[in-house]
Image (cartoon, rainbow, N blue to C red):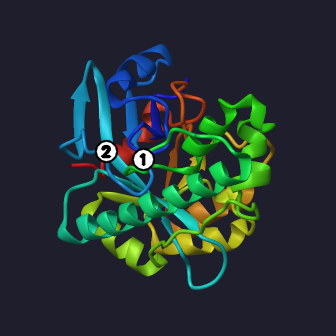
Amino acid sequence: MPYADLHVHTTASDGAMPLSAVPRAARTADVQVVAITDHDRPHPGLGAPVSRRDGIDLIRGIELRVDPAEGDAIDLLGYGVRETAELDALVDRIQRNRIERGGEIVARVEDRLGIDLALEATPGLGRPHVARAIDEHPESGYDYETAFAELIGADGPCYVPREIPSFDRGVATLRESCALVGLAHPFRYRDPESALALAADLDAVERFYPYGRPVDTDVLDRAIEEHGLIATGGSDAHDDRLGRAGLSETAYGAVEARLP
Protein backbone atom coordinates (compact mmCIF):
# COMPACT_ATOMS: atom_id res chain seq x y z
CA MET A 1 0.00 0.00 0.00
CA PRO A 2 1.21 3.56 -0.64
CA TYR A 3 2.39 5.79 2.18
CA ALA A 4 0.47 8.84 0.87
CA ASP A 5 -2.87 8.99 -0.95
CA LEU A 6 -3.04 12.50 -2.40
CA HIS A 7 -6.45 12.44 -4.08
CA VAL A 8 -9.46 11.77 -1.83
CA HIS A 9 -13.02 13.14 -1.86
CA THR A 10 -15.46 13.52 1.02
CA THR A 11 -19.07 14.51 1.53
CA ALA A 12 -17.94 18.14 1.12
CA SER A 13 -18.22 17.41 -2.60
CA ASP A 14 -19.28 14.13 -4.21
CA GLY A 15 -17.59 11.62 -1.91
CA ALA A 16 -19.47 9.24 0.37
CA MET A 17 -17.14 9.54 3.38
CA PRO A 18 -17.30 12.35 5.95
CA LEU A 19 -14.04 13.96 7.00
CA SER A 20 -14.31 12.35 10.44
CA ALA A 21 -14.08 8.88 8.85
CA VAL A 22 -10.89 9.57 6.88
CA PRO A 23 -8.34 8.68 9.57
CA ARG A 24 -9.91 5.27 10.16
CA ALA A 25 -10.09 4.58 6.41
CA ALA A 26 -6.43 5.61 6.11
CA ARG A 27 -5.35 3.28 8.90
CA THR A 28 -7.30 0.42 7.34
CA ALA A 29 -5.35 0.99 4.10
CA ASP A 30 -2.06 1.50 5.98
CA VAL A 31 -1.86 5.04 4.53
CA GLN A 32 -0.14 7.70 6.63
CA VAL A 33 -0.89 10.87 4.64
CA VAL A 34 -4.15 11.84 2.93
CA ALA A 35 -4.86 14.89 0.77
CA ILE A 36 -8.51 15.95 0.91
CA THR A 37 -9.14 17.23 -2.61
CA ASP A 38 -12.84 17.94 -2.84
CA HIS A 39 -14.19 19.35 -6.08
CA ASP A 40 -13.97 23.11 -6.48
CA ARG A 41 -13.67 23.86 -2.75
CA PRO A 42 -11.26 23.25 0.12
CA HIS A 43 -12.86 21.21 2.86
CA PRO A 44 -14.47 23.68 5.33
CA GLY A 45 -13.55 21.40 8.23
CA LEU A 46 -9.81 21.76 7.65
CA GLY A 47 -8.45 25.03 8.95
CA ALA A 48 -4.75 24.59 8.19
CA PRO A 49 -2.79 23.60 5.06
CA VAL A 50 -1.60 20.48 6.91
CA SER A 51 -3.05 19.05 10.11
CA ARG A 52 -2.85 15.81 12.07
CA ARG A 53 -5.90 13.88 13.20
CA ASP A 54 -5.93 10.52 14.94
CA GLY A 55 -2.38 9.82 13.85
CA ILE A 56 -2.93 10.68 10.16
CA ASP A 57 -1.55 13.73 8.34
CA LEU A 58 -4.30 15.51 6.41
CA ILE A 59 -3.38 17.91 3.61
CA ARG A 60 -5.93 20.58 2.77
CA GLY A 61 -6.31 20.35 -0.99
CA ILE A 62 -8.68 21.09 -3.83
CA GLU A 63 -9.53 19.66 -7.24
CA LEU A 64 -10.39 22.55 -9.53
CA ARG A 65 -11.80 22.10 -13.03
CA VAL A 66 -10.54 24.69 -15.51
CA ASP A 67 -11.05 25.50 -19.16
CA PRO A 68 -7.94 25.76 -21.37
CA ALA A 69 -8.00 28.09 -24.36
CA GLU A 70 -8.13 24.99 -26.58
CA GLY A 71 -9.32 21.45 -25.93
CA ASP A 72 -11.38 19.87 -23.18
CA ALA A 73 -11.60 20.96 -19.57
CA ILE A 74 -8.96 19.57 -17.22
CA ASP A 75 -8.65 19.20 -13.46
CA LEU A 76 -5.97 20.82 -11.31
CA LEU A 77 -4.93 19.54 -7.90
CA GLY A 78 -3.83 22.10 -5.34
CA TYR A 79 -2.10 21.03 -2.11
CA GLY A 80 -1.53 22.90 1.14
CA VAL A 81 -4.38 25.35 0.59
CA ARG A 82 -4.39 28.67 2.44
CA GLU A 83 -7.30 31.09 2.42
CA THR A 84 -6.97 34.02 0.01
CA ALA A 85 -9.52 36.58 -1.13
CA GLU A 86 -9.20 35.44 -4.75
CA LEU A 87 -9.71 31.77 -3.91
CA ASP A 88 -12.68 32.59 -1.68
CA ALA A 89 -14.29 34.61 -4.47
CA LEU A 90 -13.68 31.91 -7.08
CA VAL A 91 -14.98 29.11 -4.86
CA ASP A 92 -18.08 31.14 -3.96
CA ARG A 93 -18.87 31.78 -7.61
CA ILE A 94 -18.35 28.13 -8.57
CA GLN A 95 -20.44 26.81 -5.69
CA ARG A 96 -23.33 29.13 -6.51
CA ASN A 97 -23.24 27.84 -10.07
CA ARG A 98 -23.01 24.22 -8.88
CA ILE A 99 -26.12 24.72 -6.74
CA GLU A 100 -28.05 26.18 -9.67
CA ARG A 101 -26.79 23.52 -12.05
CA GLY A 102 -27.47 20.67 -9.61
CA GLY A 103 -31.00 21.86 -9.03
CA GLU A 104 -31.65 22.00 -12.77
CA ILE A 105 -30.25 18.49 -13.33
CA VAL A 106 -32.41 17.12 -10.51
CA ALA A 107 -35.50 18.82 -11.96
CA ARG A 108 -34.83 17.41 -15.42
CA VAL A 109 -34.30 13.88 -14.11
CA GLU A 110 -37.41 13.98 -11.92
CA ASP A 111 -39.50 15.31 -14.80
CA ARG A 112 -38.18 12.72 -17.25
CA LEU A 113 -38.43 9.70 -14.94
CA GLY A 114 -41.42 10.73 -12.86
CA ILE A 115 -39.63 10.15 -9.55
CA ASP A 116 -38.72 12.20 -6.50
CA LEU A 117 -34.96 12.10 -5.90
CA ALA A 118 -35.28 13.82 -2.52
CA LEU A 119 -32.14 15.84 -3.22
CA GLU A 120 -31.59 19.40 -2.07
CA ALA A 121 -29.35 21.67 -4.12
CA THR A 122 -26.58 22.48 -1.66
CA PRO A 123 -22.88 23.42 -1.95
CA GLY A 124 -20.88 20.46 -3.23
CA LEU A 125 -23.81 18.83 -5.02
CA GLY A 126 -22.54 16.93 -8.05
CA ARG A 127 -23.74 14.45 -10.61
CA PRO A 128 -22.59 11.44 -8.55
CA HIS A 129 -25.13 12.46 -5.90
CA VAL A 130 -27.81 12.47 -8.59
CA ALA A 131 -26.69 9.12 -9.99
CA ARG A 132 -26.73 7.55 -6.52
CA ALA A 133 -30.23 8.90 -5.92
CA ILE A 134 -31.41 7.48 -9.26
CA ASP A 135 -29.84 4.13 -8.35
CA GLU A 136 -32.07 4.05 -5.26
CA HIS A 137 -35.12 3.98 -7.58
CA PRO A 138 -34.88 0.62 -9.41
CA GLU A 139 -38.30 1.27 -10.89
CA SER A 140 -36.69 3.98 -13.02
CA GLY A 141 -34.82 1.39 -15.06
CA TYR A 142 -31.44 3.03 -14.40
CA ASP A 143 -28.59 2.23 -12.03
CA TYR A 144 -25.58 4.40 -11.16
CA GLU A 145 -23.62 3.59 -14.32
CA THR A 146 -26.50 3.83 -16.80
CA ALA A 147 -27.69 7.07 -15.20
CA PHE A 148 -24.37 8.62 -16.19
CA ALA A 149 -24.22 6.89 -19.57
CA GLU A 150 -27.76 7.66 -20.69
CA LEU A 151 -29.13 10.55 -18.64
CA ILE A 152 -26.69 12.94 -16.97
CA GLY A 153 -23.49 12.38 -18.92
CA ALA A 154 -22.22 15.13 -21.22
CA ASP A 155 -24.41 13.93 -24.10
CA GLY A 156 -27.41 12.99 -21.97
CA PRO A 157 -30.86 14.62 -22.08
CA CYS A 158 -30.63 15.74 -18.44
CA TYR A 159 -27.11 17.13 -18.60
CA VAL A 160 -26.56 20.78 -17.73
CA PRO A 161 -23.13 22.37 -18.37
CA ARG A 162 -21.55 24.43 -15.65
CA GLU A 163 -19.39 27.50 -15.55
CA ILE A 164 -15.70 26.87 -14.96
CA PRO A 165 -12.79 29.30 -14.71
CA SER A 166 -10.16 29.64 -17.39
CA PHE A 167 -6.92 27.68 -17.11
CA ASP A 168 -4.96 30.89 -16.56
CA ARG A 169 -7.22 32.17 -13.80
CA GLY A 170 -7.34 28.78 -12.11
CA VAL A 171 -3.58 28.38 -12.12
CA ALA A 172 -3.01 31.95 -10.89
CA THR A 173 -5.53 31.53 -8.08
CA LEU A 174 -4.11 28.20 -6.93
CA ARG A 175 -0.52 29.41 -7.14
CA GLU A 176 -1.37 32.22 -4.73
CA SER A 177 -3.12 29.92 -2.24
CA CYS A 178 -1.43 26.51 -2.60
CA ALA A 179 2.04 25.17 -1.92
CA LEU A 180 1.90 22.87 -4.95
CA VAL A 181 -0.28 22.84 -8.08
CA GLY A 182 -0.50 19.83 -10.38
CA LEU A 183 -2.41 18.19 -13.21
CA ALA A 184 -4.84 15.44 -12.22
CA HIS A 185 -5.19 12.07 -13.99
CA PRO A 186 -3.76 13.03 -17.43
CA PHE A 187 -4.97 9.84 -19.14
CA ARG A 188 -8.61 10.52 -18.35
CA TYR A 189 -8.70 13.25 -21.00
CA ARG A 190 -9.40 12.64 -24.66
CA ASP A 191 -6.06 14.21 -25.59
CA PRO A 192 -3.57 13.32 -22.84
CA GLU A 193 -0.58 14.82 -24.65
CA SER A 194 -2.27 18.22 -24.90
CA ALA A 195 -3.14 18.02 -21.22
CA LEU A 196 0.46 17.12 -20.36
CA ALA A 197 1.69 20.06 -22.42
CA LEU A 198 -0.30 22.33 -20.08
CA ALA A 199 1.59 20.83 -17.16
CA ALA A 200 4.60 22.88 -18.26
CA ASP A 201 2.96 25.75 -16.34
CA LEU A 202 2.46 23.64 -13.20
CA ASP A 203 4.54 22.14 -10.42
CA ALA A 204 3.38 18.53 -10.54
CA VAL A 205 1.42 15.84 -12.33
CA GLU A 206 -0.51 12.85 -11.02
CA ARG A 207 1.83 10.00 -11.96
CA PHE A 208 0.06 7.21 -10.04
CA TYR A 209 -3.68 6.76 -10.57
CA PRO A 210 -6.02 3.71 -10.76
CA TYR A 211 -7.14 4.00 -14.38
CA GLY A 212 -8.17 0.37 -14.57
CA ARG A 213 -6.52 0.05 -17.97
CA PRO A 214 -3.01 0.25 -19.42
CA VAL A 215 -1.67 3.76 -20.00
CA ASP A 216 1.46 5.06 -21.72
CA THR A 217 3.54 5.94 -18.69
CA ASP A 218 6.55 6.61 -20.93
CA VAL A 219 4.79 9.73 -22.27
CA LEU A 220 4.05 10.81 -18.72
CA ASP A 221 7.59 10.21 -17.50
CA ARG A 222 9.00 12.21 -20.41
CA ALA A 223 6.73 15.13 -19.46
CA ILE A 224 7.86 14.89 -15.85
CA GLU A 225 11.50 15.03 -16.92
CA GLU A 226 11.02 17.70 -19.58
CA HIS A 227 9.06 20.10 -17.36
CA GLY A 228 10.78 19.28 -14.07
CA LEU A 229 7.51 18.14 -12.45
CA ILE A 230 6.95 16.51 -9.10
CA ALA A 231 5.16 13.15 -9.38
CA THR A 232 2.04 12.88 -7.22
CA GLY A 233 -0.47 10.07 -6.92
CA GLY A 234 -3.77 9.12 -5.37
CA SER A 235 -6.77 6.85 -5.49
CA ASP A 236 -9.37 9.52 -6.41
CA ALA A 237 -11.45 7.82 -3.73
CA HIS A 238 -15.12 8.74 -3.64
CA ASP A 239 -15.76 6.02 -1.06
CA ASP A 240 -13.78 4.80 1.95
CA ARG A 241 -11.31 2.61 0.04
CA LEU A 242 -8.04 4.51 0.19
CA GLY A 243 -4.63 3.50 -1.08
CA ARG A 244 -5.53 2.10 -4.49
CA ALA A 245 -2.82 4.43 -5.79
CA GLY A 246 -0.43 6.89 -4.23
CA LEU A 247 3.18 7.58 -3.30
CA SER A 248 5.80 5.70 -1.37
CA GLU A 249 7.30 7.43 1.66
CA THR A 250 10.41 8.26 -0.37
CA ALA A 251 8.44 9.71 -3.29
CA TYR A 252 6.24 11.69 -0.91
CA GLY A 253 9.33 13.51 0.34
CA ALA A 254 9.33 15.75 -2.75
CA VAL A 255 5.75 16.80 -2.01
CA GLU A 256 6.30 17.19 1.72
CA ALA A 257 9.26 19.51 1.09
CA ARG A 258 6.91 22.01 -0.59
CA LEU A 259 4.24 21.99 2.10
CA PRO A 260 4.07 24.49 4.99
Whether label 1 touches label 2, CB < 8 Å: yes
User: Considering the numbered disc 1 on the image, is that residue within a helix, a strand or a loop?
Assistant: loop
- Whether 10 is drawn above or below 73: the answer is above
Q: Name the residue under label 1.
A: 38
Residue 186 placed where, x, y %? 64, 59
Q: Can residue 216 be seen in this view?
A: no
Residue farthest to the bottom? 69
Residue at coordinates 75% horizontally, 29% vertically from top-left?
138
Q: Which residue is drawn at 41% across and 49% down?
A: 124
Q: Judge whether residue 237 can be spotted in this image.
A: yes
Residue identifier under label 2: 43
> Looking at the picture, how far across and down is residue 139, in whole percent?
77, 31
Residue 55 horizontal/vertical position (percent): 27, 19
* Nearer to me, 169 or 51: 169
Q: What residue type is labelled 1?
A: Asp
Q: Nearer the viewer, residue 59 or 107?
A: 107
**Image side of residue 183 versus residue 152, left or right:** left
**Rendering coords of residue 157 (x, y %):** 74, 62
Q: Is mark 2 on a helix, strand or loop?
A: loop
Q: How crowded is mark 2: few (under 14 residues within 10 Å), some or many (20 or more)?
A: many
Disc 1 to disc 2, C-alpha distance: 7 Å
